[in-house]
Image: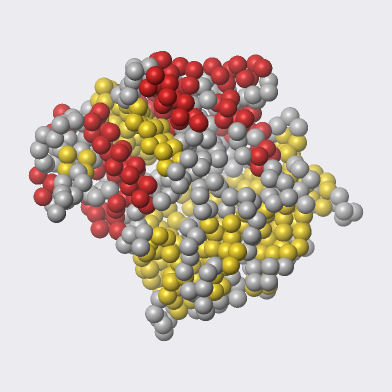
Amino acid sequence: MLLAGFGQAAAEGPRALIATHPSLVNAELPPLIPAELFYTKHEESWDHRVSPDGTKLLWLAMKEGRTTIHFRSLDHAEEARTVTSHKPVGWAYWTNDNRHIMVWSDATGDENTQVYLADTENPDADLRSVTPYPGTKVRHQQKFPDHPNEYLLQLNRRDRSVFDLYRINALTGEERLVAQNPGDVFKYYTDQSGAVVAVKRRLPNRLWSLDVPDGTGGWRAIASGSTEDKLWIEGHPLAGAGWAWAISNLGRDRLAVVRLNLKTGEEEQLYEDPQADVQGLWVDEISYEPLIASSMPGYLKTKIFAPHIKAVFEQIGADGRFDFNFRSWNTDKSVFTVEITRDTQGTSNFLVDARTGKVMSLASPQIARYQDKLSTMKPVRFSARDGLELNGYLTLPTGIRGKRLPTILRVHGGPFARDYWGFQADDQFLANRGYAVLRVNYRGSTGFGRAFMKAARKQFARKMHDGLIGAGNWAVDQGIADPQNVAIYGHSYGGYATLVGLTFTPDIFAAGISVVGVADLVSAFESFPSYWKNGLARWHAYVGHPENPDDRSDMAARSPINYVDRITKPMLVVHGANDVRVSRDHSDRIVAAVTKNGRDAQYIVFDDEGHVIRKPRNKMAFARALERFLAEHLGGRAELSPPSP
């Protein structure tokens, strides 16, 4: 694309490659917002956590291009200090001794997360490894208020395909095996003392059971189900109580909050949303009382059980157009931190003193400075070809008078996940460049009930893709999208959907962006991580089992790699070299085949990333490539690199 000049907004923002799409040429678009404000946090702090005794605060922030742990006293009696870490920091939290910090790190993107310990009284010392087991993946299970440095952790050290449960002292390194996995357990549930009160087991024929101790050293099932049946326990039940708060859809279409009898499996329903699945339940870690349940049919809906939580939301101004996450509490729940997210403001962090009702702002994102120039995200509904009602979200550029816009169909990953209302960096970045962005919760997405999920069985590249086409048609029919300038873009399953779009419906999309996308369903299933084995029942039910000849043939028929000769539209392909979920081989093969056919494919490989692009420099490299690619093929704006001095 030739540089045709600079838009008027360029004087107020970064130097811009001006838009060439007819709907944008005379549009009053806002100034171009620098890409780093969407994809890096160089001026921000986030993930604030209060210490168990309520006297200290820790948070993450960027320093010299790295995510760094910071901490200070809440009364500001001392300056904030940083923890020295040569390991990438994923997340961190206080130990219950109020002195040490547990640090979680995935150094290479291979998802073998390890745990380290930092000492705030000696923050310049090297982190000490709590789990010094190379090639092992660690999962958090529980920490204990009355045993400050002891943790329940899951490790696949003994057998890479399953996780055993250990009680580990982070200071001394002492460990005790709590439960050895017999090979079929994929979830442990523990009470407040750390005792295992239930396990979730994989059964043959795509079934599962929830088992409880039988009193004689064995186990007995109190509930069971198939692929679409869901039941899980929330929080850690009171020791010896014999019941737990749970989320379940047993005997109903949608997930609801229930009180589960751990002896009989009987359920007493507490709360159900009539439109959508309950997606989360927060409970008090000590009293085990329910605090708040949430669902999201379009915007967020909450059911608040605790009056003081309602009062907090009222003070923060969270009036329904928000999402939230509780990050931490002190032991007596008198002080806690909460994140509030809005579509045009990003995520802000607050400290709440429940004793006084005082709410203090801790940090706001850098993008919030541009909130009046960002675009609102609106829930929309439309029908797939077979009439199934689908939920989606639409983000339009500000300053647009005309219609028939260049449009991005943004497909979420999973596929057993969903899109949510809130701040989406991709959507805001693309809208600022002049694109309409449409997300769709296609069949098989979570959050909309059992029947909606079941409608996706064996529908990869079939009705699941039809729903995406239906979303695009809806946008065209509404006058929103220019039918000749719609691109499809997604990560993981969204990358697969992109490749399906370019091969199965090659005349629909003007371009495609596949990030860590699956090109070959058969090889994908044969290379999944070994510890996924107890969770593959749903995949086999919905996609197929490669060891079954009929399924294998059907999976091959729905694999884009076998239809590369149909690709005629430009594509941008991105992959992390260390991806263990979707190996780099998928992108290597699809790009090699497209190139062999004489077509161009722009290909970016990040050698230090896995399934998620995490590092700021790599996020920025991708953002630059994305906006230039779309500007060339759809006609939106792009940011030019700063001129040389």
Image location of residue 162, percent across then percent down = 70, 45
Q: Is residue 276 above or below residue 174?
A: above
For the point 51% across and 53% down, which residue is it? Answer: 107
In this rendered view, identify the residue nearer to me: 183 or 22: 183
For the point 37% across and 52% down, which residue is it? Answer: 616
- Regarding residue 286, the answer to whether it shows in the image is yes
Quarter of the picture containing the N terminus is top left
- Asked if residue 96 lies left or right of residue 15, the reply is right
Q: Is residue 325 above or below residue 557?
A: below
Total number of numbered labels? 0
Q: Is residue 377 above or below residue 93?
A: above
For the point 67% across and 54% down, which residue is it? Answer: 154
For the point 41% across and 66% down, which residue is it? Answer: 350
In this rendered view, identify the residue nearer to me: 606 or 482: 606
Quarter of the picture containing the C terminus is bottom left
Image location of residue 89, percent across then percent down = 48, 59
- Asked if residue 451 lies left or right of residue 519, the reply is right
Q: How is the image coloured?
A: secondary structure
Image location of residue 136, percent across then percent down = 64, 51
- Regarding residue 246, the answer to whether it shows in the image is no
Q: Is residue 35 above or below residue 56?
A: above
Hey, which quadrant is residue 489 in on the image?
Answer: top left
In the rendered image, the residue lying farthest to the bottom is: 77
- Asked if residue 391 lies left or right of residue 41, the reply is right
Image location of residue 124, percent across then percent down = 48, 74
